[in-house]
């Protein structure tokens, strides 16, 4: 199931498990945020809101609060007018955990876990002996 949601004036096409960056939302990292401005839900049946779908919501977890890379703005006119300005936009990283269509249909994100094999751990702890290479011999050139 996928959905189109309006978040902070922008529309995003999402499905459960997506990781998106949106304009800054005032929430702590690890907090859960709900969005009820669901414009459309697709899947087996398509539900289109007029303008939104009543009872539908998208649940997301705040993964990070950060700023984008710096953008430099240079202004210049002939003569002595020069201005240099920089800008960094704040954003929030969200992990979409659940999509509810308001009619009882719910799609949840699958939780991915990392498993480490015991052999791989043991291989990392072993010490390796490294042979050092001898420097190459100098070549002599005979002049005729």
Image (cartoon, rainbow, N blue to C red):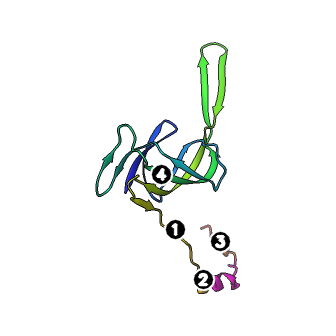
Dot in front, 2 or 3: 2
Q: How many marks?
A: 4
Look at the numbered disc 3 and give the secondary structure of its residue: loop
Magenta stretch in the rendered image: 121-134
Q: Sequence-wise, which precedes: disc 3 or disc 1?
A: 1
Quote the CA–CA distance across marks 4 and 3: 76 Å
Look at the numbered disc 2 and give the secondary structure of its residue: helix
Residue 91 left/right relative to 132: left
Question: At x 47% / y 38%, what residue is drawn?
Answer: 10
Vertical comparison of 52 with 141: above or below: above
Residue 102 left/right relative to 137: left
Dot in front, 3 or 1: 1
| Spot occupied by residue 75 in the image (x, y as percentages of width and height) | 60, 22
Look at the numbered disc 1 and give the secondary structure of its residue: loop
Q: Which residue is denoted by mark 1 in the rendering? A: 111
Q: Sequence-wise, which precedes: disc 1 or disc 2?
A: 1
Q: Which mark, by number, is residue 140? A: 3
Residue 128 left/right relative to 102: right
Quote the CA–CA distance across marks 1 and 2: 23 Å
Q: Are marks 3 and 1 in contact (CB under 8 Å)?
A: no
Q: Sequence-wise, which precedes: disc 4 or disc 2?
A: 4
Quote the CA–CA distance across marks 3 and 1: 66 Å
Q: Which residue is denoted by mark 2 in the rendering? A: 120
Quote the CA–CA distance across marks 4 and 2: 39 Å
| Spot occupied by residue 21 in the image (x, y as percentages of width and height) | 53, 47
Q: Which residue is denoted by mark 4 in the rendering? A: 58
């Amino acid at each position: 199931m996928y959905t189109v949601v309006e978040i902070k004036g922008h529309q995003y096409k999402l499905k459960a498990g997506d990781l998106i960056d949106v304009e800054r939302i005032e929430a702590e990292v690890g907090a859960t945020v709900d969005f009820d401005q669901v414009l459309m839900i697709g899947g087996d049946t398509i539900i289109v809101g007029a303008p939104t779908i009543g009872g539908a919501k998208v649940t997301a977890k705040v993964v990070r609060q950060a700023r984008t890379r710096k953008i430099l703005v240079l202004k210049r006119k002939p003569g002595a007018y020069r201005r240099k300005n920089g800008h960094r936009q704040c954003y929030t990283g969200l992990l979409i955990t659940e999509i509810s269509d308001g009619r009882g249909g719910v799609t949840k994100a699958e939780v991915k876990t990392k498993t480490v094999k015991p052999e791989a751990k043991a291989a990392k702890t072993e010490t390796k002996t490294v042979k050092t290479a001898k420097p190459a011999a100098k070549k002599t050139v005979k002049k005729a």
